[in-house]
Image (cartoon, rainbow, N blue to C red):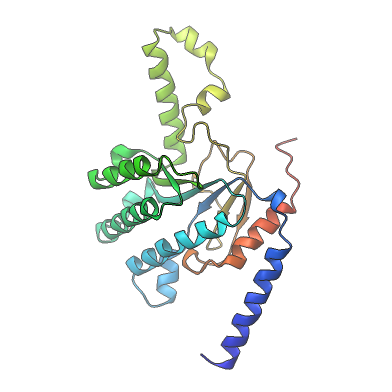
Amino acid sequence: MNLRDNLRRLLLRFYTRRVEGHLDHDQVPKHIGVIMDGNRRWAKAAGSTAAQGHRAGADKIEEFLGWCSETDVEVVTLWLLSTDNFDRPEDELVPLLGIIEGVVRTLAADGRWRVHHVGTPDILPSQMQTALKEAEETTAHVDGILVNVAIGYGGRQEIADAVRSMLLDAADKGSSIEDIAESVDIDLIGKHLYTSDQPDPDLVIRTSGEQRLSGFMLWQTAHSEYYFCEVFWPAFRKVDFLRALRDYAARHRRYGG
């Protein structure tokens, strides 16, 4: 490593500490959603394979959660696999599923996080379903950050599943169509979402420079703040995270008012 690289690292470390020192912990979001985008483009730029990009992205997750634990963040939702991702070629999808399963097992074994699956389990391989169930059971007692792992997740699918769950619940109670129609409101649908009883995301971070939601938590993010970062997910740094928190703290949330 040459002198210029050493100097750059030193300046970055100094700048990171400066940003961290000015962070207002009273303004830290309680729930952060993360669209971890750019693994394949990072790999292509580095001359690596897509699988290597996904592994690098997976390795970033625990580091990111460590940064969150240094603040007052209480819930983190990580979008690991969308329903649309199942359309990818099998030679990419199969390794990706294995990498994601490894992430789930690693988070559960860490002991610092409470793992909760958000998504449609029926479309996942049985081995993945088992890993998710075991992770939820073994971390149910953990008092640390609640980590939602969005796997086999789609925002429209979640709303459809919530409505279906609501109707089946009403049918089990013997409610008529008229009674169901009369009782439907925002709170009732919210109780049947994958994130029932959780606070909605205050901040959504998307890496790689893309500025769209792609169906991420369509219901819950109605009043969320968004932060779009140019860097690819595997290269996401603590200073990028702190900049997102600083940007969030500087905003005046109006909740549609």
Q: From the image, which quarter does the C terminus lie in?
A: top right
- Point out residue 125 in the picture as x, y percentages from the top left corner: 25, 45
Q: Quadrant of residue 138?
A: top left
Q: Is 221 displayed left or right of 177 in the figure?
A: right
- Point out residue 217 in the picture as x, y percentages from the top left corner: 51, 41
Q: Nearer the viewer, residue 31 or 157?
A: 31
Q: How many labels, in total? A: 0
| Residue drawn at (55%, 55%) of the image | 69
- Point out residue 188 in the picture as x, y percentages from the top left corner: 52, 22
Q: Is 204 displayed left or right of 170 in the figure?
A: right
- The residue sitting at the bottom extreme is 2
Q: Nearer the viewer, residue 219 or 34?
A: 34
Q: Is 103 displayed left or right of 183 in the figure?
A: left
Q: Nearer the viewer, residue 104 or 92?
A: 104
Residue 64, placed above or below residue 185: below
Q: Is 257 displayed left or right of 51 in the figure?
A: right
Q: Nearer the viewer, residue 152 or 177?
A: 152
Residue 18, placed above or below residue 113: below
Residue 159 appears in view: yes
Residue 42, placed above or below residue 120: below
- Point out residue 214 in the picture as x, y percentages from the top left corner: 49, 48
Residue 124 appears in view: no
| Residue drawn at (71%, 49%) of the image | 26
